[in-house]
Image (tube, coloured by chain):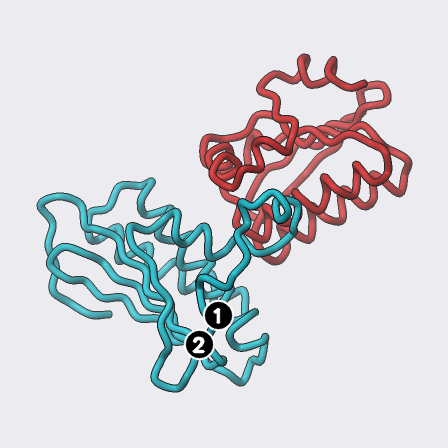
Amino acid sequence: MLDSVDLAESIVMRVAEASGFSEEDIHKIGMAVREGVINAYNYGNQQDRAKKIRLTVELEPETMRVLVLDQGKGFVLKEVPDPLAEENLLRTSGRGLFLMRAFMDDFEVRTGPGGGAELVMVKKLPGGVSGNGRA
Amino acid sequence: MTLQGTCREIGEIVVVDFSGKITLGEGSSMLRRTLRDLIEHGHRKIILNLYDVDYIDSSGIGELVSGYTTVRGAEGELKLLHLTKRVHDLLQITRLFTVFDVRSDEEDALRSFR
């Protein structure tokens, strides 16, 4: 699983680099993807190695979108405990979604075609760079 | 680079110099094992020198928090030293900067123990 996480992160970081993002933004995008894939495996697919995670990277004229789809039962974002709440600060888990939202310009969770959760992470392309492709 | 750590004892205080990534898998496990071993050997004043840790994910943050509560539960003190900008920023945005005792100077960190 860890190899897959590293691979997903690496792939998206390469796309981000090719798209002209700064080193810091590449790092943030990579971390967001990393957290998304780990979440998909742990919570979405319940660590069931038979289930798949689909990673999609879309380059649009002004944005880069990364989608992470699991084969779980889906979840409601607003029902996830706030890791910044005082009572949750010393929890040892539960920060992945928060970090994804912090590192990306836009973030949402929607229900995928099979009922799993699809994380949609968006980062605005650096100024003057445009793309039109899907990976 | 996988996480590597070397321990230095300065009186009652142990400084663990870390290098690498604290991420899900080996890095987080290594941090966990290190702190567990230090506690089991009776150490209660611990400084984690993160001067060369430029990458930590939410699992790594979880292990830092776990380490903090474990050391505190053993009536010890855990301090963080020489945070890189990325780790510093992560602890800031997760509000953990208000939890940990973070130092930028080793002498200052050593003097700060009760």
Going by the numbered disc 1, the residue's amino acid type is: Ala
Q: Secondary structure at mark 2?
A: loop
Q: Quadrant of residue A1?
A: bottom right
**Is B69 situated left or right of A57 in this image?**
right
Determine the residue positioned at 33% across, 68% down.
Answer: A67
Determine the residue positioned at 86% across, 38% down.
Answer: B74
Residue A112 versus residue A62: which sits nearer the camera? Answer: A112
Disc marking residue A7: none
Determine the residue positioned at 80% across, 24% down.
Answer: B13
Residue underneath mark 2? A70
Q: Position of residue B12 (x, y in %)?
A: 86, 22
- Which chain's colour is red? B
- Which chain's colour is cyan? A
Chain letter belonging to callout 2 = A
Q: How many marks?
A: 2
**Is A18 situated left or right of B86 in this image?**
left
Tell me which numbered mark, 2 or 1, is placed earlier along the sequence: 1
Q: Secondary structure at mark 1?
A: helix
Q: Position of residue B46 (x, y in %)?
A: 76, 30
Task: Give the Cα separation between the discs numbered 2 and 1.
Answer: 5 Å
A55 lies above or below B20? below
Q: Quadrant of residue B47?
A: top right
Disc marking residue A40: 1
The quadrant of the rendering that contains the C terminus of chain B is: top right
B83 lies above or below A57? above
